Amino acid sequence: MSLKVIGVGGPRTGTASLKMALEQLGFGKCYHMEWVFNHTEDVAYWKELYETGTTDFERLFDGFQSTVDFPGYLNYQAFLKQYPEAKFILSERDPEAWYESALNTVFSVTPQTFGQKLGMMKKMLFSKKFRDMSKAFLLVEKYLWKGLYEGRFKDKAFALNRYQGTNQDIIKTIPASQLLRFNPADGWEPLCEFLGVAVPNEPFPYKNKRKDFKEQLNKMLNTGEALVLK
């Protein structure tokens, strides 16, 4: 199954809302980082894609018609080559608001300090769930925090510059006819017009607000339970 819609916006830019919206619009299951935490066997495919520029796309996206968020969004060049007819959506957010949200959610729960990593290692000794979960965290650490952000995400000026620079690279790379710059606050209309589908009667799904997301992440870290977007 080929991907029809590819989200190229980073975490905390409304990707959970976009995921739910695409599923409501009839594009089937949408791939999101949530899936990786709950199906860590996929980590090997993502590592191969980051390191070589290709992987077994058919196996990785079996049953999916769209993808959003990390780990997919940074592979836009490989996706454009693999799915030249796909439509791309760059979810955007005010940079200052994005940074504050990302710093206090996805960055803060990824084990950063020696103490945090030691705590995770202790849990891994006694739990297969945590051993599996660590594979997903290592993927985030290697290719997002140490890769894209070079281990300098706490340097706000650097992080904002890299965030905006990445978006500009995406805009320059994806043909304008295939790219929608989308703020989830704009709701259904621009998204549906771009995708050529009717506007639903239901409200646009604003999901994964900071409080809900942080609670889910902390629950996952404390119990090893599956991550579920709200």
Image: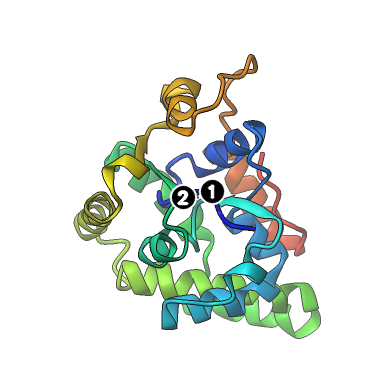
* Label 1 CA crowd tier, 10 Å (few <14, some 14–19, many 20+): some
Horizontal side of residue 130 vs 102, given as left or right: right
In the rendered image, the vertical position of residue 150 relative to residue 223, given as above or below: below
The residue beneath circle 1 is: 4
The C terminus lies in quadrant: top right
Residue 63 on image: x %, y %: 71, 56
Q: Residue at x 59, y 76 (%)?
A: 56
Horizontal side of residue 58 vs 189, given as left or right: right
Residue nearest the observer in this picture, 207 or 193: 193
Q: What kind of colouring is applied to the model shown? A: rainbow
* Residue 186 in which image quadrant: top left
The residue beneath circle 2 is: 86
In the rendered image, the vertical position of residue 11 relative to residue 147, given as above or below: above
Residue 182 on image: x %, y %: 38, 34
Horizontal side of residue 105 vs 97, given as left or right: right
* Label 2 CA crowd tier, 10 Å (few <14, some 14–19, many 20+): some
Q: Secondary structure at mark 1?
A: loop
Residue 16 on image: x %, y %: 56, 42
In the rendered image, the vertical position of residue 188 relative to residue 225, given as above or below: above
Q: Spatial distance from mark 2 to mark 1, Cα to Cα?
A: 5 Å
Q: Are marks 2 and 1 in contact (CB under 8 Å)?
A: yes
In the rendered image, the vertical position of residue 11 relative to residue 22, given as above or below: below
Q: Amino acid at mark 2?
A: Ala
Residue 48 on image: x %, y %: 51, 81
Earlier in the chain: of badge 2 and badge 1, it is 1
Q: Amino acid at mark 1?
A: Lys
